[in-house]
Amino acid sequence: MRKSLQHLLPVLQTLGAIFMLWKGLSVVTNSPCPVHVVISESMAPAFHRGDIIVLSNLQREIRVGDIPVVWFKQAPLPMVHRAVKVLWETRPGGGGDVEQLILTKGDNNELEDVALYPGDREYVYRDEIIGVVRGYLPFLGWITILLNEVPYLKFGLIGGLALIGAFT
C-alpha cells in the first residue's frame, strides 16, 4: 500500500503544480480563464480551429479592433470575435450609469453577432468580457479538441497513464 502511494505522490504533485500555475495565471491576467482553445473557423484568418489563445483582462476599455472573449452567463462556451463598434450609453433597464457597449463580429462571418446575443440585445456589456486576446499558439489546441471529440482517445490516454503509473 505504501509503495502504491509513493507512486501516486509525483502525479498529485504535478496536478497541484498545474492547478497553481493556472490560478496564478488567472490572477496575473485578471481573467477566470486566461487560456482557451479556438473550436471554430469564425475568426479565420486571424485564428483557426485548434489554436490556443492567451487572454488578458487588465484594460478597462475595449477598443474597435480588439478581440474580446465574451462569455454569457447561460452559454456553455465563450465567443471570440472582434469588436467592430463601441458605444458609451446606459444599459437598457439598468441603473442609469453610462457603460461600454460592444458590437462584435467574427472575421470570417458575414453578419454581426447580434443573433448570438441573449434576448433582444444588440450589444455585449463590458462585464460579460472575460478577457482580450493578447497572443496565440497555432495548432496546439488540437490535443484538447481530439480528447473532447473522440471519447475513446480520452479513455485510452487515462488507461495508458494508469498503466504507466502502476508499473513504474
Image (tube, grey):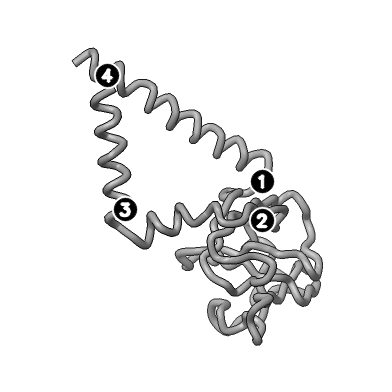
Asked whether the residues under the numbered discs 2 and 1 touch, taking CB atoms below 8 Å apart as contact, a structural biologist would say yes
Secondary element under disc 4, as helix, strand or loop, is helix
Q: Earlier in the sequence, mark 3 or mark 4?
A: 4
Asked whether the residues under the numbered discs 3 and 2 touch, taking CB atoms below 8 Å apart as contact, a structural biologist would say no
The three-letter amino acid code for the residue at tag 3 is Leu
The residue tagged 3 is 153
Q: Earlier in the sequence, mark 3 or mark 1?
A: 1
**CA distance for labels 3 and 2:** 31 Å
For the N terminus, give its image quadrant.
top left
Q: Earlier in the sequence, mark 2 or mark 1?
A: 1
Closer to viewer: mark 3 or mark 2:
3
Secondary element under disc 3, as helix, strand or loop, is helix
- Label 1 Cα neighbours within 10 Å, binned few <14 / some 14-19 / many ≥20: some
Q: Position of residue 86 (x, y in %)?
A: 78, 73
In the image, taking residue 52 as reference, residue 46 lies left or right, namely: right
**CA distance for labels 2 and 4:** 40 Å
**CA distance for labels 2 and 1:** 8 Å
Q: Position of residue 142 (x, y in %)?
A: 49, 57
The residue tagged 1 is 30
